Amino acid sequence: GGTTPESLHSTVTFCHLPCCGSNGREETSTTKICTACILLLTSPTNASSTVSTTTPTTNNDENENDDLKKPSPPLTRRIGRCPRCRHWIAVSSDTLGIVTRIEAIHHAGKCKICNQEKEFLVQQNTNEQVCDACFLGRRRPLIYECEQCHATQRIPHPMYRYQPSLQEFGKNSWACQGLCQNFTMWRILPQQVRYI
């Protein structure tokens, strides 16, 4: 009664990854990623479930089925790294969890959170452009200590990446909202490390 590799392969839908699967490489790759896994490996953006499209209608028949005029289900947009080549990708799926589109992300510009020019902006809407670090940091902002005034602050950027060690303050600055009111160095609180 077990599932054989042949029958498993016939029931799984595999992704065509635009970053490392182009030019016929997807067909020859020994590493396949199924659509269920690509949804687990990506995170929903703030724009999820807000985009809907209307099924096009034709003018040939005035008695067209009314179902054709109903809007299609809203799409969910997710962001993550390709598990094969680590390039940033955007995955669109419907409310049933069926992947409808996978795109490689090539946006560059200034991040709206850290104000740095970045090669990849993994979330791009009309109101915001967010770099990969701030995209991850905003999903789980951690608490840091300011080097100058020692106030604590929740920062939507992975500032721990710039610390040589847990005890040392990092080498990149962030605006302190405490007594400093200036750009200072930070270190993550020890009790926050488990959330990384």
Image (cartoon, rainbow, N blue to C red):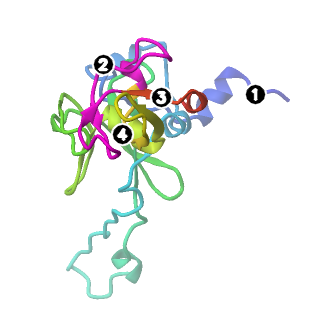
Q: Is residue 186 left or right of residue 128?
A: right
Q: Which residue is mark 3?
A: 188
Image height of 156 relative to 46, above or below: above
Residue 23 at x, y percent in the picture: 25, 20
Check disc 4 and report its element: helix, strand or loop.
helix
Please give the label number shown on residue 3: 1
Residues drawn in magenta: 160-185
The earlier-in-sequence mark between 2 and 1 is 1
- Residue type at the position of mark 4: Phe
Disc assigned to residue 109: none
Q: Amino acid at mark 2?
A: Lys
The residue at which mark 2 appears reads as 171
- Among all residues in the image, which is located at the extreme right? 1
Q: Rounded to the nearest whole Å, what is the CA distance between mark 2 and mark 1?
A: 53 Å
Sequence order check, earlier mark of 3 and 4? 4
Is disc 3 placed on a helix, strand or loop?
strand
Q: Closer to the observer: label 1 or label 4? A: 4
Mark 4 / mark 2, whichever is N-terminal: 4
Examine the structure image and report whether residue 174 is included in the region drawn in magenta.
Answer: yes
- Res 104 seen here: no
Indicate the amino acid at tag 1.
Thr
x, y (%) of residue 60?
21, 79
Q: Is the residue under label 4 in contact with that under label 1 (CB below 8 Å)?
A: no
Q: Residue at (54%, 56%) from the top-left corner?
A: 96
Other-residue count near label 3 (Cα within 10 Å), few / some / many at <14 / 14–19 / ≥20: many
Q: Residue at x 50, y 33 (%)?
A: 41
For residue 135, the mark is 4
Residue 85 horizontal/vertical position (percent): 37, 18
Task: Estimate how packed mark 4 is, as few (under 14), some (14 to 19) or many (20 or more) residues with alpha carbons within 10 Å.
Answer: many
